[in-house]
């Protein structure tokens, strides 16, 4: 069972010392404090006033303590990240579903379970125009996933956000996956690449059952300038994964364009009992 704690190993969530040394960081800090003094914010999880101008994830300390960490290998499938029932599975163990139908991505890593209060954070990012939450999620993801991604960081290839269709982009004003991927790439020291695009408008995956999700994404993605991907190891970034169908479809297109490997990373993973 995952402990409902906010993953805060040293340097994982609080900005490292060099954060304040970036150009404009001090000015941004003053602006954040002024905005909070004029318009105090409420916790996205419980609605209580936040105790400081910059509260990670827009959550109070109590709600951050309620965040449940997602299982990581070897307690989860080394491919799709599904939690395993075995008490001590061997390293690199792959679940039966992935052995029968291997996904196009090589690994799927998540930081938290997509459950309250993380759902309020993601909802604020996607629909509340709180785009700064993408940076907060990226800070936490960089700290939590740095060790599992150590081999990818050594190769130093590309970070790619899952794209929005242009119609949804115009409605929302930005791509929430890109709002996470850009600061994540900066923290990991990898280049961001936005050559993956959606060519077909599809219904939101959250409104579909598992069967419809798998068929909803056929030919949804394409790659611009595929030569950039030849032999590359790609870090594919999205906000939330449920069955992994979106990431699977995107990874398949990236590999067809020449990517050597695709590791998918998300902030939240929907609990297994909600997949059906």
Image (cartoon, helix red, strand yellow):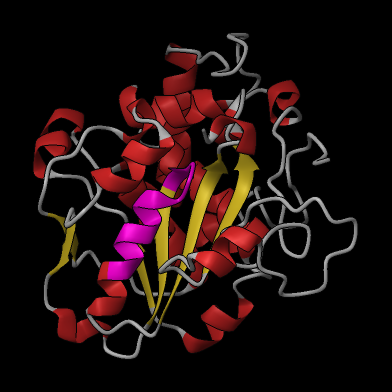
Horizontally, residue 35 falls left or right of residue 254, namely right
Where residue 87 sits in the image (x, y, percent)? Answer: 90, 56
Residue 13 seen by the camera: yes
Residue 23 seen by the camera: no
Frontmost residue, 241 versus 90:
90
Frontmost residue, 89 versus 179:
89
Relative to 12, residue 28 above or below: above
Frontmost residue, 117 versus 221:
221
Residue found at x 32% / y 24%: 127
63 inside magenta stretch: no
Relative to 13, residue 272 above or below: above
Horizontally, residue 253 falls left or right of residue 78, namely left
Frontmost residue, 42 versus 93:
93
**Residue extent of the magenta highlight:** 239-252
Residue found at x 44% / y 44%: 239
In the current view of this chain or complex, which residue is farthest to the top? Answer: 48
Q: In which quadrant is the N terminus drawn?
A: top right
In the current view of this chain or complex, which residue is farthest to the right? Answer: 87
Where residue 18 sits in the image (x, y, percent)? Answer: 57, 63
In the current view of this chain or complex, which residue is farthest to the front? Answer: 100
Relative to 65, residue 162 above or below: below
Residue found at x 62% / y 36%: 271
The image quarter in which residue 96 lies: bottom right
The image quarter in which residue 170 lies: top left
Horizontally, residue 181 falls left or right of residue 164, namely right
The image quarter in which residue 6 lies: top right
Marks counted in the figure total: 0
Residue found at x 62% / y 38%: 272
Where residue 80 sits in the image (x, y, percent)? Answer: 56, 59
Where residue 268 sits in the image (x, y, percent)? Answer: 55, 42
């Amino acid at each position: 069972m995952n402990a409902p704690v906010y993953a805060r190993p040293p340097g994982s969530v609080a900005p490292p010392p060099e954060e304040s040394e970036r150009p404009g960081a001090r000015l941004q800090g003053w602006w954040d404090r002024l905005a909070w003094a004029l318009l105090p914010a409420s916790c996205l999880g419980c609605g209580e006033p936040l105790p400081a101008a910059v509260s990670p994830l827009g959550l109070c300390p109590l709600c951050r303590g309620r965040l449940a960490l997602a299982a990581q290998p070897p307690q989860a499938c080394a491919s799709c990240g599904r939690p395993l029932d075995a008490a001590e599975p061997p390293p690199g163990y792959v679940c039966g579903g992935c052995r029968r139908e291997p996904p196009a991505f090589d690994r799927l890593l998540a930081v938290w379970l997509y459950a309250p209060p993380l759902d309020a954070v993601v909802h604020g990012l996607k629909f509340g125009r709180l785009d700064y939450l993408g940076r907060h999620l990226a800070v936490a993801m960089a700290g939590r996933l740095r060790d599992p991604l150590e081999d990818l960081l050594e190769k130093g290839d590309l970070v790619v956000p899952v794209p929005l269709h242009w119609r949804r982009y115009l409605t929302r004003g930005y791509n929430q996956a890109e709002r996470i991927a850009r600061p994540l790439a900066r923290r990991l020291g990898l280049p961001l690449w936005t050559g993956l695009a959606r060519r077909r408008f599809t219904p939101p995956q959250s409104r579909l059952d598992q069967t419809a999700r798998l068929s909803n994404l056929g030919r949804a993605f394409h790659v611009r300038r595929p030569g950039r991907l030849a032999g590359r190891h790609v870090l594919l970034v999205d906000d939330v994964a449920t069955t992994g169908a979106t990431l699977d479809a995107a990874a398949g297109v990236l590999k067809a364009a020449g990517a050597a490997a695709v590791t998918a990373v998300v902030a939240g993973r929907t609990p297994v009992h909600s997949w059906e």
